[in-house]
Amino acid sequence: MIIKNNKNYTKKNENPIYLADKLQAVYEDNYHIFSELVLTPAEIKPSTIKSYGVYNYILKLNNNLPSVFVCIENISKYTLHCSMRIEEGVIGEHKNVYNKPYNFRMKLYLDAKLLEIYDINYERKHEINIKSGISKKILDSSNTETRLVKSTFLNQWLKTLLNAEYHLINL
């Protein structure tokens, strides 16, 4: 028996302008979703930011689904660092389902209305600021395609939280 392997590769659009435009669109969409989930309910805007501060919030749906922990560190009036992670542990009453969280680390630019993700990890091996939980490795030197993948992954997760109607609880 002869098995033929047909290699039909689809050519990626590696045009840097196309990738940059796509990345910009995802950054803007992420910002708007994050704003609806966190910034607007927490009343975070440039006019309310007076000095450096670290604020912790929880996005909660119900007791059966894990909470999402949000830490926001205002660096300046228009730039915020943020980390988000889902609660670790057994999900609800399902003893066989154990959730291992991802940590998303982002920069929010309030004036440009952009949310840029700079780190996703599921192991805590990066050096982290103990007070805020923000990675000290601020901008990973990754290429545009990698940033697009990370941003799209975050975008899908934020849309899931929004569609599931998670709401903000202030600590």
Image (tube, rainbow, N blue to C red):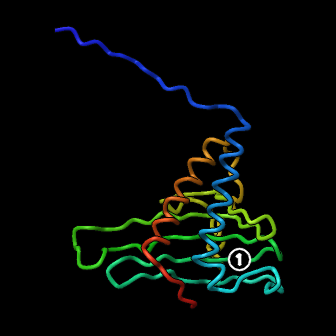
- Taking depth in this image into account, of 101 and 162 the one nearest to the observer is 162
Foreground pick, 97 / 115: 115
Q: Residue furthest bottom?
A: 171
The structure residue drawn at horizontal position 54% and vertical position 59%, both measured from the top left corner, is: 154
Question: Mark 1: which amino acid?
Answer: Glu
> What residue is rendered at 66% in x and 79% in y?
39
Compared across the picture, whether 10 is left or right of 32 comes to left
- Which residue does the image show at 80% across and 84% down from the upper left? 49
Eyeballing the image, is 90 above or below 137? below
Tag count: 1
Which image quadrant is residue 40 in?
bottom right
Q: Label 1: state its secondary structure.
A: strand
What residue is rendered at 57% in x and 90% in y?
170
How many other residues sit within 10 Å of disc 1, few (<14), some (14-19) or many (≥20)? many
Q: Position of residue 108 (x, y in %)?
A: 71, 67
Q: Is residue 161 above or below residue 139?
A: below
Residue 98, position as x, y percentages in the image = 31, 68
